[in-house]
């Protein structure tokens, strides 16, 4: 449905959910889109499996578009869905997510500090936004490594399948 400049409907919901599934800079498409473009575009596809999507009754087949020229353009037969990651990969993934968050927080603190210095070094106020960023980073660490973090990671992995 179109209302003014807004689009509504199941296709829009699926597209929004696929955006969250795609890797940064990557593209994911639904099975319906794949059926329309598989013989028209000379690019490769990876079948990611059928996945449950919020507010959509049936599971949706999802394909990742291969953007690298080294990947073979073989859309004929989708490979089997990837095997679930071993349980030992969980702590490493959480540690990696935490360090990514810490790096983002560090960049934000540097940006706030730079703005403070450019607006006049006689009035230092950057410590207050820095404190808020540090609190958010601590909450992120608790969520990733605190009590119950193992179960949360398994529940998230179950939702993605």
Image (cartoon, rainbow, N blue to C red):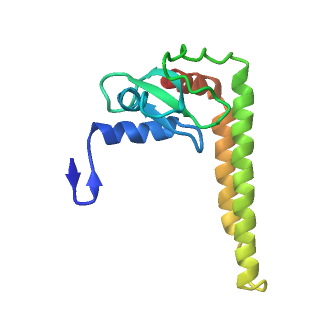
Residue 19 is left or right of residue 26, and the answer is left
Residue at the location (39% across, 29% down)?
Answer: 53
Residue 61 is left or right of residue 152, and the answer is left
Residue at the location (45% across, 36% down)?
Answer: 18
Front residue (pair 45, 111)? 45
Residue at the location (41% across, 29% down)?
Answer: 34
- Displayed quadrant of residue 85: top right
Residue at the location (39% across, 40% down)?
Answer: 15
Residue 127 in sight: no
Residue 50 in sight: yes
Q: Is residue 158 above or below residue 7?
A: above
Q: Position of residue 153 (x, y in %)?
A: 60, 26
Q: Is residue 92 above or below residue 8?
A: above
- Displayed quadrant of residue 35: top left
Front residue (pair 38, 113)? 38
Q: Position of residue 107 (x, y in %)?
A: 73, 59
Q: Position of residue 22 (x, y in %)?
A: 53, 37
Q: Is residue 105 above or below residue 53?
A: below
Residue 45 is left or right of residue 89, and the answer is left
- Displayed quadrant of residue 40: top left
Q: Position of residue 156 (x, y in %)?
A: 54, 27
Q: Is residue 98 above or below residue 66?
A: below
- Number of on-image labels: 0
């Amino acid at each position: 449905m179109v209302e003014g400049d807004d689009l509504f409907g199941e296709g829009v919901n699926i597209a929004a959910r696929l955006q969250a599934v795609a890797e940064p800079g990557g593209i994911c498409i639904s099975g319906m889109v794949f059926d329309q473009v598989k013989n028209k575009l000379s690019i490769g596809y990876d079948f990611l499996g059928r996945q449950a999507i919020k507010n959509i009754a049936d599971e949706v087949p999802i394909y990742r578009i291969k953007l690298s020229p080294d990947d073979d353009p073989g859309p004929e037969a989708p490979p089997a869905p990837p095997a679930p990651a071993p349980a030992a990969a969980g702590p490493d993934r959480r540690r990696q997510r935490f360090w990514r968050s810490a790096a983002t927080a560090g960049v934000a603190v540097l940006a706030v500090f730079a703005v403070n210095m450019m607006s006049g070094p006689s009035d230092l106020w950057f410590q207050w936004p820095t404190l808020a960023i540090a609190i958010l980073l601590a909450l992120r660490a608790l969520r990733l490594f605190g009590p119950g973090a193992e179960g949360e990671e398994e529940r998230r992995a179950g939702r993605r399948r």
